[in-house]
């Protein structure tokens, strides 16, 4: 039987291509595009810690939940892109992988430290996709094999934290933007991972996760 672990986000922020001020302390996260006199592209950055998972945990089901406070005009595709990623057998760690929540903006991952590309340095290939919600409330934004594989084969296997950016697949017309509660929100839950899975049982040694069975 699979065990469920719910993991709250450790750091979150959103960045805006036009409003370049720091948004890390905001109670809200934006994903999408709004169009007026300018085209505002908004992306959300999330980082989680897996330290609460038992050693050797294998994820069988994974979901990213976020509370939508303002729904999008349409269910535009949202993609998740990892900051750190595998290229062959090499782990690629862009300079801005340790973005600082309080200071990150569209142009900088920390004060005085610019992204190589404005908007964030991340893997050009997404590892999972979902859709912007068209109704408010608790939303299962991302799920499926791509998220499972990312957590199992990259994060757990290499002792790394889930650390990724959420963005519209098409960052242009038609406009669609959703607003979500951040971890600082005083009313609604911030982003969280729901992970179902199993830990290895060493029957021969009579141990579970290194602890003797009594």
Image: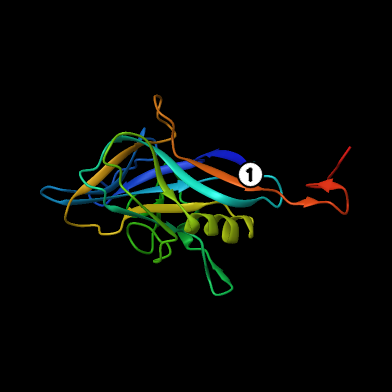
| Residue that appears at 16% across and 56% down | 173
| Whole-percent x, y for residue 105 in the image | 35, 49
Residue 197 coordinates in the image, percent (x, y): 62, 47
Residue that lies at the very extreme toward the bottom in this rendered image: 88
Q: Position of residue 120 (x, y in %)?
A: 38, 58
In the picture of the structure, the residue carrying the numbered disc 1 is: 2
Residue pictured at 53% horizontal, 45% vertical: 48
**Res 179 visible:** yes
Q: Which quarter of the rendered picture does the C terminus lie within?
A: top right
Q: Is residue 51 left or right of residue 23?
A: right
Q: Residue furthest left?
A: 37
Classify residue 4 as left or right of residue 15.
right
* Coloring basis for residues: rainbow
* Mark 1 surroundings: few (<14), some (14-19) or many (≥20) residues within 10 A: few
Residue 66 quadrant = top left
Q: Nearer the viewer, residue 104 or 122?
A: 122
Residue 23 is left or right of residue 82, and the answer is left
Furthest toward the top, the residue is: 187
Res 125 quadrant in image: bottom left
- Residue drawn 62% across the image and 55% down it: 156
Disc 1, SS: loop
- Considering only vertical position in the picture, is 41 above or below 1? below
Closer to the camera in the image, 112 or 34 = 34
Quarter of the image where one finds residue 13 = top left
Could you tell whether 118 is left or right of 162 in the image? Answer: left
Is residue 146 depicted above or below 54 in this figure?
below
Can residue 49 be seen? no
Residue drawn at 63 percent across, 44 percent down: 2
Q: How many marks?
A: 1
Quarter of the N terminus within the rendering: top right
């Amino acid at each position: 039987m699979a065990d469920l672990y719910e993991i709250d986000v450790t750091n979150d922020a959103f960045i805006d291509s036009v409003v370049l001020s720091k948004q890390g302390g905001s109670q809200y996260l934006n994903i999408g595009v709004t169009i007026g006199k300018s085209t505002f592209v908004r992306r959300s950055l999330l980082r989680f810690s897996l330290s609460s998972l038992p050693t050797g945990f294998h994820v069988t089901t994974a979901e990213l939940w976020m509370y939508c406070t303002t729904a999008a005009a349409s269910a535009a595709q949202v993609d998740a892109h990892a900051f750190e990623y595998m290229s062959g057998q090499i782990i690629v760690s862009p300079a801005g992988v340790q973005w600082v929540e309080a200071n990150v903006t569209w142009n900088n991952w920390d004060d005085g430290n610019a992204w190589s590309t404005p908007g964030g340095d991340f893997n050009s290939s997404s590892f999972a996709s979902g859709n912007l919600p068209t109704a408010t409330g608790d939303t299962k934004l991302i799920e499926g094999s791509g998220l499972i594989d990312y957590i199992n084969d990259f994060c757990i296997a290499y002792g790394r934290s889930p650390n990724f950016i959420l963005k519209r697949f098409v960052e242009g017309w038609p406009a669609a933007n959703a607003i979500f509660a951040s971890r600082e929100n005083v009313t609604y839950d911030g982003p969280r991972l729901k992970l179902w899975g199993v830990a290895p049982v060493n029957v021969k040694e009579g141990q579970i996760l290194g602890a003797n069975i009594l």
